[in-house]
Amino acid sequence: MTVAPDTEVAAQPSAAVKAKPRRTWYLIGTPLLIVCALVADWLYVRSTHPDANARTTLQTSYMLSKLLEHLELTVVAGVFVLLIAIPLGILLSRKGMRLATPVVLALANIGQGAPAIGIIVLLAVLWKTGFEVAVVALIIYAVLPSLRNTMVGLQQIDPSLKEAGRGIGMSAAAVLFKVELPLAVPVILAGVRTTLVLLIGVAALSSLIGAGGLGEMISTGVQLQRYNVLVTGSVLVACLALFVDWLAGLAERYLRPKGIKA
Amino acid sequence: MADNGNGSGGAAHGVEIELRNLTKKYPGQAKAAVDDVTMTIPAGEIVALVGPSGCGKTTTMKLINRLIEPTSGEILIGGEDARRRPADILRRHVGYVIQQGGLFPHMSIAENVSLVPKMLKWDKKRTAERVDEMLELVGLDPANYRDRFPRQLSGGQQQRVGVARALAADPPVLLMDEPFGAVDPITRGRLQDELLRLQEELHKTIVFVTHDFDEAVKLGDRIAVLSEGSHIVQYAEPAEILARPANDFVRGFIGEGGAMKLLHVTRIADVDLGAGVTAKATDDAATVHSRLAEAEEPWAVVLDKNSSPVQWASIEDLDGKTGPVSEYGTPITTTISGRADLQAGLEALLGSDTDFVPVTRRRQYIGLVSLNTVQSAIQQLREQAKQAAPASVGEGSA
Ligand SMILES: Nc1ncnc2c1ncn2[C@@H]1O[C@H](COP(=O)(O)OP(=O)(O)O)[C@@H](O)[C@H]1O
Ligand SMILES: [Mg+2]
């Protein structure tokens, strides 16, 4: 770990630790938790006898459209994060790029260090409101874990392995694609997982600048003082985050190259 | 498959490596890590580079396969300038083994071993066959180990796979950088023995880096003792270095017990053995007795019809006796092969209840070894080394 030991980094190894396989109940534990949360919310909402105002927001079709908007924000921002973070992480882990590393990491740290709501509002003030702005804000906010884990994942590889690769006649590119990246996969995936969970959470703020998503339910709930709407919106965001974390956990499990100690 | 036709037929024998005024200066360092080194590594030999840590052994090695480019000087491999081919291509024809094998943990043993053949575009069948052949060569059952991952193997086994991977595409040259440095002494001894066995079969040119002088003595056909800057302090056969260290630096490296090590590198058959008095089993006891008396020897060695030593006959037991000498002998319990080293001879002597041990070559008697033989052999080795021209000293490093 040659990256600056700030709190972010301290937090990261625990994300890497998460990459360890859990017991099998993890496979069903999270989905079970999600189902329970949804059922509990449904029971709660029913007990509050929602009025007409609340019912418009609690319609399945409305909630579904907000969920899809939320996912769209997350997926689009997520794809961009990966397109930026992984190549940039690779580039920064090459020899000769050592000097640029602290600069880029400092920038990314600012992105995550600043309050998410600040970034979103600032961008909206400086630029405009809407989907694109929200996506850009999300990228800025969530690029760090993926970027850092890509770099750390590549840098932690035993240099003698890279040298062994070159020593038996593999090209630099072959060493990167056949040795370095496969060995870094667990750490990179742990970063991607953190990025995705962050994105789900922060995407809830996008409704502030008119980019939709489940955040809208939360704001509506607050504005109309309908707590059943507010709670349902929050529960949906939380469940979505859990679900994405679960999926990413599965990916970590099954994409980890065989032969690497878990 | 154009440029490597050696996979199926006989293995490629070693070729000569020549370093000419080789210098490597790392940027920002005052002294060159490798300073104007000139040396010839003969085809088919194991040359051990031995020297203190940081003296430039690894750098020298990496210059040969161009993991590092020299500041100046040149390298010829089999007479061909190493720079003639792109470095990646060159390295596919130069085996490289590092400490702990350098195996890729996410690839199975078979995948690891097949890397170079695949880069050379061998077809699948030939590659798979070669993998099995190589695993067998290094003493690992292919069926059992092929599909395992490196972490499921012991350190010694990983090291074997490392050797198998380096040899897979049958390179004429093998570079080994402290390959057995990280395994326990017993495993190391075994790996060393195995390397020697392999080499008897393969006749590669092997450059073997170590900081362990005893390892260099055991493995090297020649040893280059290096000091800082990869300066060659002495480059000679082990026996000569042991018998006549060029200076205190080399002496320091040999450490205690140089004479004992000398015993290690000398074959019994190569020293002057006592001839002893021999007799055929059918010889008459009285004749043998008189021959012993004449030679002033207390014992005769009785040989069977294949010239194998079978009995001792003492002059006392034969006194006044007639008939075949074999009737008065006592069986010989200890013999030693002429191919064994003097150290083994000494051990045999200490372990036997006679002052002499018969030496055989292909079971046939060739002489007797005694403490005296060993002692005079060492003296003689020292003498010989003194007479040898001092050409072996400091070759090249101006
Ligand atoms: N990549 C490098 N950059 C700078 N200096 C190096 C590098 N590799 C080795 N050196 C220096 O070169 C000298 C020889 O190193 P090396 O060849 O590794 O020695 P050995 O293998 O004999 O221990 C040492 O002083 C070492 O510090
Ligand atoms: Mg070294």
Image (cartoon, helix red, strand yellow):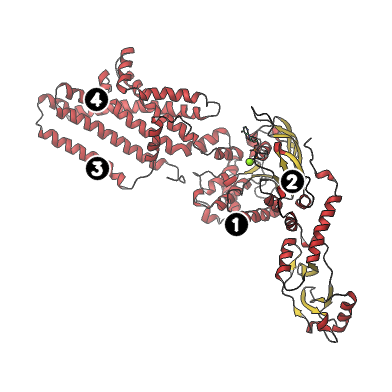
Chain name for mark 2:
B
Label 3: how many residues lie within 10 Å, few (<14), some (14-19) or many (20+)?
A: few
Q: Is mark 1 within 8 Å of ligand 2?
A: no
Label 4: how many residues lie within 10 Å, few (<14), some (14-19) or many (20+)?
A: many
- Left or right of B124? Residue B369 is right
Q: Quadrant of ligand 1?
A: top right
Q: Nearer the viewer, residue A158 or B318?
A: B318
Chain name for mark 4:
A
x and y, in percent, of residue A45 in the image: 13, 33
- Left or right of B310? Residue A45 is left
x and y, in percent, of residue A151 in the image: 46, 31
Q: Relative to residue B243, is residue B303 depicted above or below?
A: below
Outermost residue on the top side: it is: A126
Q: Which residue is mark 3?
A: A32
Q: Which residue is mark 2?
A: B250
- Given this view, does label 2 or label 4 mark the residue nearer the observer? 2
Q: Relative to residue A245, is residue A26 depicted above or below?
A: below
Q: Secondary structure at mark 2?
A: helix
Q: Is mark 4 within 8 Å of ligand 1?
A: no
Label located before the other in sequence (4 or 3)? 3
CA–CA distance in space, label 2 to label 4: 78 Å
CA–CA distance in space, label 2 to label 3: 72 Å
CA–CA distance in space, label 2 to label 1: 26 Å
